[in-house]
């Protein structure tokens, strides 16, 4: 359930977490890092997680990775490169714009992404999730 607190927390950051999964109320920073490092690929319910990301140089991406995942975006890029070169996986799906990110997450069950609060302000609050430590 999205509470007024989670909406207030979202407004205080330069980005918000968007999740298209009804039974996920919030995520810890550790869980989100595992998802974006492609170490967790299914939700506890067994549904596949579709992970979306902005280009590495995008300011919202850099801020999201540093604040939410607690690492520089270059470190996350290295993690994805190791997955590719080892043949163990692939990075999250790349979207070019925040608008494309919002459309992709809203239209994909089980998806997770991020965007500036201003872009999601009018969307149903059931898609905005809180991030906790």
Image (cartoon, rainbow, N blue to C red):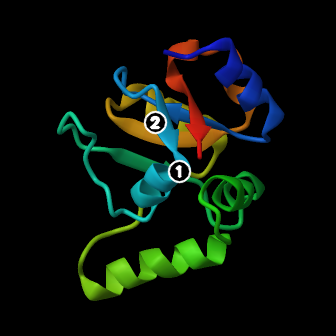
Q: Residue furthest left?
A: 46
Residue sitting at x 45%, y 40%: 112
Residue sitting at x 68%, y 72%: 72
Residue located beneath label 1 in the image: 95
Residue 76 picture quarter: bottom right
> Does residue 4 appear in this view?
yes
Residue sitting at x 77%, y 57%: 59
The answer to whether residue 70 is above or below residue 129 is below
**In what element is the residue under mark 2?**
helix
Marks 1 and 2 sit apart, C-alpha to C-alpha, by 8 Å
Q: Residue furthest front?
A: 133
Q: Position of residue 19 (x, y in %)?
A: 46, 32
Residue 13 picture quarter: top right
Judge from the rendering whether residue 112 lies leftward or rightward of residue 121; answer left or right.
Answer: left
Residue located beneath label 2 in the image: 104
Q: Position of residue 3 (x, y in %)?
A: 61, 14
**In what element is the residue under mark 1?**
loop
Residue 66 image label: none
Judge from the rendering whether residue 132 lies leftward or rightward of residue 45; answer left or right.
Answer: right
Q: Position of residue 121 (x, y in %)?
A: 71, 19
Residue sitting at x 24%, y 39%: 44
How many residues crowd around disc 2 within 10 Å: few (fewer than 14), some, or many (20 or more)? Answer: many
The answer to whether residue 113 is above or below residue 66 is above
Mark 1 or 2, nearer chain start: 1
Q: Position of residue 40 (x, y in %)?
A: 31, 56
Of residues 6 and 37, the one nearer the viewer is 6
> Does residue 118 appear in this view?
no
Find out whether the residues at labels 1 and 2 contact each other: C-beta distance under 8 Å.
yes
């Amino acid at each position: 359930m999205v509470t007024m607190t989670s909406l207030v927390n979202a407004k205080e950051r330069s980005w918000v977490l968007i999740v298209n999964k009804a039974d996920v109320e919030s995520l810890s920073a550790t869980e989100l890092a595992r998802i974006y490092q492609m170490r967790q690929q299914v939700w506890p319910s067994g549904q596949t997680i579709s992970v979306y990301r902005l280009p590495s140089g995008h300011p919202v991406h850099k801020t999201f990775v540093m604040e939410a995942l607690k690492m520089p975006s270059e470190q996350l890029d290295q993690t994805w490169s190791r997955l590719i070169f080892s043949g163990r996986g692939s990075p999250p799906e790349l979207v070019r714009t925040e608008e494309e990110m919002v459309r992709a997450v809203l239209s994909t069950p089980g998806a997770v992404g991020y965007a500036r609060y201003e872009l999601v302000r009018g969307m149903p609050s059931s898609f905005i999730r809180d991030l906790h430590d």
